[in-house]
Amino acid sequence: MAERWITKNGRRIPIVDGGGGKAVAAGVAAVMIFGGGGVTGAAGGSSVGVETVSVRKADAKRSARKGKADDAWRRMGMRRLKRSVSKRNRGCVRVTWGEVRRSLLRDPCTSLDRRLFAIADRRGNIALVSVAWVRFRTSDARRRFQDVIDVYGTGDIRPLGAGRLGLAHVRFTGRYYHSIPKRARLTVAEAEAVKGGFDPKVLDGLAEIAAELPSPRHRRR
């Protein structure tokens, strides 16, 4: 049997238990629905070459840190298909599950912002990128939460429904994931192929780039 693996914060981690608990089966179903090769790639795959990912990713991260998401995708040889969708929640528990939810019951968040992008390469291959910004009262609470969510199979924050972008029935597997802490805030990003084939390094790179995006600003009432 070929080795199965995921990427977590840029590290390759073998799967030894059948895939853990981040909706792996649902992710495979999504690939079947759209006839793609989202996990392993497909013949005539993405126009984003693996050999250029490192250079492209570095430039894209710089744009993302400035809040220029569309420019970041362009630097990866991709473009946004539709308006991204966003939502803010005061609490986090009801949009999480598994050990991640239990962690939030112990250390409640103060707010949660989520955003969902649909992006495509020049050949029409489509990927979804989900970003969540979770805030806590203290850095210690954030650290305890990160210790849980960064472990594959512990549950997750539910991304916004892909149906809002006309891409229903797509779920995230948690295979391509990255998180970045900043004091009492944790940014969590995930990527998933929707149509066509993307190399795992490309999907992992998209998650790394998205995790650099600054959190949304909200007016105080």
Image: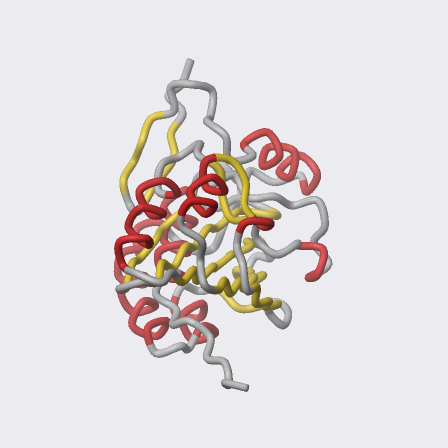
Q: Position of residue 45 (x, y in %)?
A: 51, 46
Give the quadrant of the C terminus.
bottom right
In the displayed structure image, the side of residue 69 where residue 59 appears, left or right = left
Q: Position of residue 211 (x, y in %)?
A: 37, 60
In the displayed structure image, the side of residue 155 where residue 82 appears, left or right = right
- Say which of 124 and 203 sits in front: 203
- Say which of 195 and 210 sits in front: 210
Give the quadrant of the N terminus.
top left
- Whether 171 is drawn above or below 5: the answer is below
Q: Position of residue 44 (x, y in %)?
A: 53, 44
Residue found 70% across the figure and 44% down from its top: 169
Residue found 35% across the figure and 56% down from its top: 208
Picture quadrant of residue 134 = bottom left
Q: Position of residue 37 (x, y in %)?
A: 56, 38
- Say which of 120 and 61 sits in front: 61
In the displayed structure image, the side of residue 120 where residue 72 appears, left or right = left
- Whether 217 is drawn above or below 80: the answer is below
- Whether 88 is drawn above or below 196: the answer is below
